[in-house]
């Protein structure tokens, strides 16, 4: 029980990330040839796609958004792929495995952002923007200032997310494949670089689609095998878990005991999803608002389904493998899904799940890098430094240089943060996305009176307050730095930082109105509502 | 042409209808989800109870399932109306502005 509590404590924010002190204490496993073989097949296939995509990546639109040629269902799969990271498969299975019902609450919080993105954002993003979400925030405001700040907050989110993914990747791959940490980090960095550099968004999208397919297939198959042991009834499975671990396993536990914390977690995960740059960027890969809406519908269904499958896997592992067995290899229980695969399907199934987890990390890192490169080249270089006067060829070359730079940065960050507990960084990424990107985006889309000053102030407030409150939180001060008490009682700062950032944006805008921005709103509103495509189609038809 | 589109009363109608529908659905999502979160926070015992005496379904599992399924249905409803009614209205607005332009 004590160990469970420690694990629970360590796992405060780590449903999202599988890294942590738990993993690095783990011994390197024997080289798993099944996993390596299957992974090689995946890499070979995706490299073939990258080669094909490279031939089609000619313009910046191809590079950043696959030329808008992705269909609704494909984009739905790719969005789901971007969102279902290895952290979701391993972390949420682990959380269900160690804590039962609590993980369900996390899953729901991750899920409910999607309908809101559809209702309030998807079509506006598609209609008004081109490559990045800063296109929308800065549409009728001062390009230089707003874009600079939006790029800074995007890059901050991307960096924290990258650290968590890279460190997680290194640990995980060491654990699953039995290769050294540094080598694993370098492999992830290099393969991802090849995808993005040569294949741009076309390759990244197809890698996401294949990976999402594999992930859904692998997890569903595993869940079916689990259910077959319980007469195909999830209820019998839950009941077996209850018999083994008591009623508490089907009731909310410590994780959300504090009401404030529960709401705060909900806010951070829900609105954070709507502020993640690599997710927002996916809306530009389709041709119009109609397709953008459809893609969220597919993505929402796939993501919801995947969470339910993960929930079954977690309970399956806790009943069929047993809680002690996995937490003995890794305190956080992150090996729950692979261990379950091994118990049920032997070494080849273990290999398959491991390869899928590796592929997942690669795909997510590629998506992150591409969105970081877009912030650097499209926002900062093309629009801030060159003030929009930048030849296509130069834009593309800057974007590629930015990609190389980010890949090197990702590898370095992975190596620098080796052995650190970086789990809180995913929480930080979501908190900044929710507090810095989301309020500015919503206000610029929906409020005529929003100003340049208001936008910058809101984004600065969101970024600074989210970072500060996380540094002062129990997750960092107590768990990481070993202090007795933390200055801020909240593990998740969302309940303070999101409203604060809205408030600052509104007050600063009211304090000094910006007539030009108000005039520009009518045009923006029209474009957001009708979309450029309807007008262009009409012009084409009649010309 | 752009001015004419905005001046079209149908444009205001579209903006009003769409935003009313979007906010209605958003608030439904927010209220149901935070209602669930509040129950979890203030009455965790209730979540672990079976839905009815002797049933194997617990309230928490059922309510979670309800959220997953019903929110997905809400996205389907929105996509249906937006891709049908709202997009048809958009087409009309663009066409009328185009005709008026000549």
Image (cartoon, grey):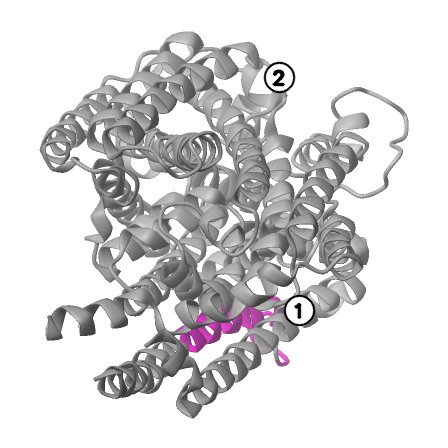
Which residue is depicted at the point 78% across and 20% down?
A481
| Residue on which the image places disc 2 | A420
The local secondary structure at tag 2 comes to loop
Q: Secondary structure at mark 1?
A: helix
Q: Is residue A128 above or below residue A356?
A: below
Q: Is residue A442 left or right of residue A187?
A: right
The overriding secondary structure of the stretch rendered in magenta is helix
As drawn, A372 above or below A291: above
Q: Quadrant of residue A479?
A: top right
Magenta stretch: includes residue A511: no
Q: Which residue is mark 1?
A: B36
| Nearest to the observer: residue A103 or residue A440 | A440
Q: Position of residue A388 (x, y in %)?
A: 39, 39
Seen at 37% across and 60% down, the residue is A126
Q: Residue at x 34, y 68 (%)?
A: A531
Name the quarter where the N terminus of chain A is drawn. top right
Q: Pointer 2 indicates a residue of which chain?
A: A
Front residue of A298/A276: it is: A276
């Amino acid at each position: 029980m004590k160990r469970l509590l420690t694990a629970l404590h360590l796992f405060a924010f780590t449903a999202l990330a599988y890294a942590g002190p738990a993993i690095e204490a783990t011994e390197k496993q024997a080289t798993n040839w099944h996993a390596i073989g299957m992974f090689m097949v995946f890499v070979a296939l995706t490299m073939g796609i990258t080669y094909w995509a490279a031939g089609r990546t000619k313009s910046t639109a191809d590079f950043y958004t696959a030329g808008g040629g992705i269909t609704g269902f494909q984009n739905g799969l790719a969005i789901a792929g971007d969102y279902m990271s290895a952290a979701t498969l391993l972390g949420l299975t682990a959380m269900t495995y160690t804590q039962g019902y609590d993980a369900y609450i996390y899953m729901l919080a991750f899920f409910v952002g999607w309908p809101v993105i559809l209702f309030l954002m998807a079509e506006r993003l598609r209609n008004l923007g081109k490559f990045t979400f800063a296109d929308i925030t800065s549409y009728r405001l001062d390009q230089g200032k707003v874009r600079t700040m939006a790029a800074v907050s995007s890059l901050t989110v991307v960096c924290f997310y990258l650290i968590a993914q890279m460190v997680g990747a290194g640990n995980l791959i060491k654990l699953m494949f039995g290769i050294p940490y540094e080598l694993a980090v370098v492999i992830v960095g290099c393969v991802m670089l090849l995808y993005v550099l040569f294949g741009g968004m076309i390759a990244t999208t197809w890698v996401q689609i294949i990976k999402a397919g594999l992930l859904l297939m692998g997890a569903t198959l595993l869940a079916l095998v689990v259910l077959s042991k319980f007469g195909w009834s999830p209820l019998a499975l839950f009941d077996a878990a209850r018999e083994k671990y008591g009623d508490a396993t089907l009731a909310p536990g410590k994780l959300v005991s504090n009401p404030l914390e529960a709401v705060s977690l909900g806010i951070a995960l829900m609105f954070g999803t709507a502020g993640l740059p690599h997710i927002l960027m996916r809306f530009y890969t389709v041709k119009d608002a109609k397709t953008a809406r459809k893609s969220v519908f597919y993505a929402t269904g796939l993501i919801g389904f995947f969470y339910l499958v993960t929930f079954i896997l977690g309970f399956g592992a806790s009943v069929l493998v047993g809680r002690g067995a996995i937490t003995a290899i890794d305190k956080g229980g992150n090996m729950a899904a692979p261990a379950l695969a091994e118990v049920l399907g032997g070494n080849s199934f273990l290999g398959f799940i491991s390869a899928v987890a590796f592929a997942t990390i690669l795909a997510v890192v590629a998506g992150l890098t591409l969105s970081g490169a877009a912030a650097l080249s499209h926002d900062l270089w093309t629009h801030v430094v060159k003030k929009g006067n930048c030849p296509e060829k130069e834009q593309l070359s800057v974007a590629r240089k930015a990609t190389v730079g980010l890949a090197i940065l990702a590898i370095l960050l992975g190596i620098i943060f080796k052995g650190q507990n970086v789990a809180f960084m995913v929480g930080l990424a979501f908190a900044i996305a929710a507090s810095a990107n989301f309020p500015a985006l919503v206000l610029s889309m929906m409020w005529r009176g929003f100003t340049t000053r208001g936008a910058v102030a809101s984004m600065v407030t969101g970024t600074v307050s989210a970072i500060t409150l996380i540094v002062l939180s129990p997750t960092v001060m107590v768990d990481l730095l070993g202090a007795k008490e933390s200055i801020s009682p909240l593990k998740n700062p969302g309940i303070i930082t999101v409203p604060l950032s809205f408030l600052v944006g509104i007050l600063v805008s009211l304090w000094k109105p910006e007539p030009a921005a108000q005039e520009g709103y009518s045009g923006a509103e029209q474009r957001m509502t009708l979309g450029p495509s309807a007008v262009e189609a009409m012009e084409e038809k009649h010309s | 042409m752009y001015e004419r589109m905005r001046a079209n009363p149908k444009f205001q109608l579209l903006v009003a209808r769409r935003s009313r529908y979007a906010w209605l659905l958003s608030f439904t999502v927010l209220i149901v989800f935070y209602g669930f979160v509040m129950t979890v926070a203030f009455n965790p015992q209730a979540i672990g109870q079976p839905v009815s005496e002797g049933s194997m379904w617990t309230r928490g599992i059922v309510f979670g399932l309800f959220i997953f399924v019903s929110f997905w249905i809400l996205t389907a409803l929105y996509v249906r109306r937006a891709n049908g009614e709202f997009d048809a209205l958009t087409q009309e607005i663009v066409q009328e502005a185009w005709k008026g332009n000549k």
